[in-house]
Image (cartoon, grey):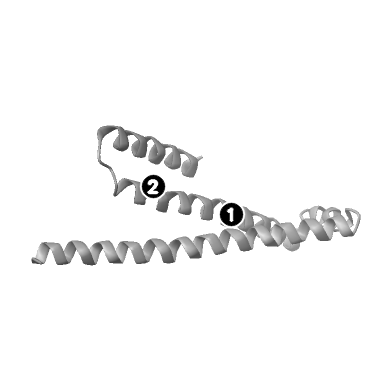
Amino acid sequence: MGIIGRVKKAATDAGRFLSTTGRGALRKIGDTAGSIKSFAGKVNEATGGAAGTAWEASKSMPVVGAVTTNIEKGLNLAQKGSAMGLKAIDLGERATKIRSVGDAKGVYGDARSLYKDARG
């Protein structure tokens, strides 16, 4: 195997490792954020809505409001970022398998859509 073949194989192996490791980490982040939000919903349900009312009321308090608002924003961003990261990894894997103009057009369209979602 020539030097170019070895470099290509090393790059492929590194890319595969990063995508599987990254995919697992992103999935865990999204799942954890979802679990936290689900747990909060169950607590709210168990308290007859009192916990949700208290959470919303806490947003109007000076220091506490900033913390609760940022917690909520952080969980939402974690879920959105995780989903977008997973889509980007899948898109990258599809891009490595392009064999025709039609494949390239599909990947380009999906990449463009993902970019718009990230900006919006």
Look at the picture and state if 48 lies above or below 2.
Answer: above
Judging by the rendered image, the residue that carries numbered circle 1 is: 79
Toward which corner of the image does residue 4 lie, by quadrant? bottom left
Query: Which residue extends farthest right?
Result: 48
Q: Of residues 72 and 99, which is closer to you in this image?
A: 99
Look at the picture and state if 108 lies above or below 63.
Answer: above
Give, as a three-letter code, the residue at label 2: Leu
Name the image quarter holding the N terminus: bottom left
> Where residue 94 sits: x, y (%)?
35, 47
Label 1: how many Cα within 10 Å (few below 14, some 14–19, many 20+): many
Q: Is residue 120 left or right of residue 105?
A: right
Q: Is residue 69 left or right of residue 47?
A: left
Look at the picture and state if 83 lies above or below 9.
Answer: above
Q: Please report the residue visible at 15 percent of the width from the left and 67 percent of the height from the top.
A: 6
Q: Please report the residue visible at 24 percent of the width from the left and 63 percent of the height from the top.
A: 11
Judging by the rendered image, the residue that carries numbered circle 2 is: 91
Q: Considering the numbered disc 1 on the image, is that residue within a helix, a strand or a loop?
A: helix
Q: Is residue 106 left or right of residue 69?
A: left
